[in-house]
Image (tube, helix red, strand yellow):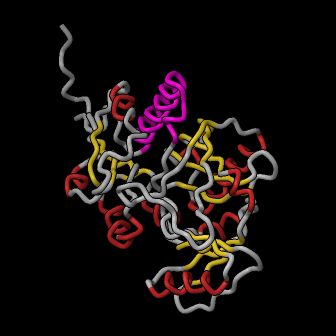
Amino acid sequence: MKLARPDVFHPRIVLAGCPKLISGDGDDDGLVNALRTRGLAARWLSWDDPQTLDSDLVILRATWDYTERLDEFLQWTTRVPHLINGPDVVRWNTDKTYLRDLAAAGVPVVESAFFAPGQSVDLPAGQVVVKPAVGAGSVGAQRFTDHRAALDHAARLQDAGMTALIQPYDPRVEQGETALVFLGGRPSHAFTKGPMLPSPGSTAVLDESGTYAEEVLAPARPDDRAWQVGHAALEAAATHLGCVPQDFLYARVDLLGAHTEPSLLELELVEPSLGWRQLGPVERAGAQRQFAVCVESALGRLGLGPFAHRSP
């Protein structure tokens, strides 16, 4: 008969959703079991549930209402005992002005201009995309051929206290985006996202929770050029934040033109969908196992390993 090990520490792990999607949209359904196979117990809670403050580790997964409660959310990230990805990462990555930091580091980034409340908005020629600099799930993103309408949308964002992000419309969007998923700084898998921008002047169709735009996803096999841009983005982000890419439990790099001249559209380090459902059963099990291994490694780095609380 095996004896109990009272000196073994079992960290209390929370996968954080939001009030309308406490356990996410279903894509992450296998993570609790994947963690259990490593001897790690996890449960889902909404990020604003007070019980998250009593956990040992919180993993951001579906906190998709943070754009509406940004100050409250950012304060909460500093109150939980341990958070991955961490509070400094979250604060930097929730505001798309981070694109300027990546561009300055030499990452090929889609042309972007930012206009804070009170600043005069300057539009490039041709079709433009206007969206809030703090936004998730394509909520608030619109495409315009009419510059007057584009300026009006930017003004509404600014009047609401938001910074407006202006980008020239890139026709490569019609082929969709390629999302590269990294786990612990290493490539894992990829998938495509069909065109998400509606026709000029229209708004995106949101899911019933209202937290993200509906997407058409499919598996992808990008070539080395795309992964090189992904690695460059992670290296630049880690350097800027004073860490190493391995410190990011997960990262998603969204590219346009992945098979020609890849350009970074977004680097998602806060709560991105990771496209597990686009993988076959064997590949998905392997990728989620790697996710669990990365969580285990993070626990070790944080001093939350199995013998963390053992008496001397």
> Compared with residue 117, is residue 220 higher up or lower down, i.e. above or below?
above
Determine the residue positioned at 55% across, 69% down. 202
Classify 18 as above or below 200. above
Give the residue at the far top of this rendering: 1
Q: Is residue 67 left or right of residue 39?
A: right
Q: Is residue 42 left or right of residue 28?
A: left
Q: Which residues are magenta?
A: 275-301
Q: Residue at x 24, y 55 (%)?
A: 53
Residue 278 magenta-drawn? Answer: yes
Whether 184 is drawn above or below 124: the answer is above
Q: How many marks?
A: 0
Q: Which residue is nearer to you in this view: 71 or 53?
A: 71
Q: Which quarter of the rendering shows the N terminus?
A: top left
On screen, residue 41 versus residue 99, left or right, reads left
Question: To which quarter of the image does residue 65 belong?
Answer: bottom left
Quadrant of image for the C terminus = top left
The answer, for residue 200, to whether it is visible in the render is yes
Q: Residue at x 52, y 68 (%)?
A: 203
Task: Give how far across and how far down residue 300 sits, in percent.
Answer: 41, 38
- Magenta highlight on residue 249: no
Could you tell me if residue 89 is visible in this image? no
Front residue of 203/41: it is: 203
Q: Residue at x 58, y 42 (%)?
A: 182
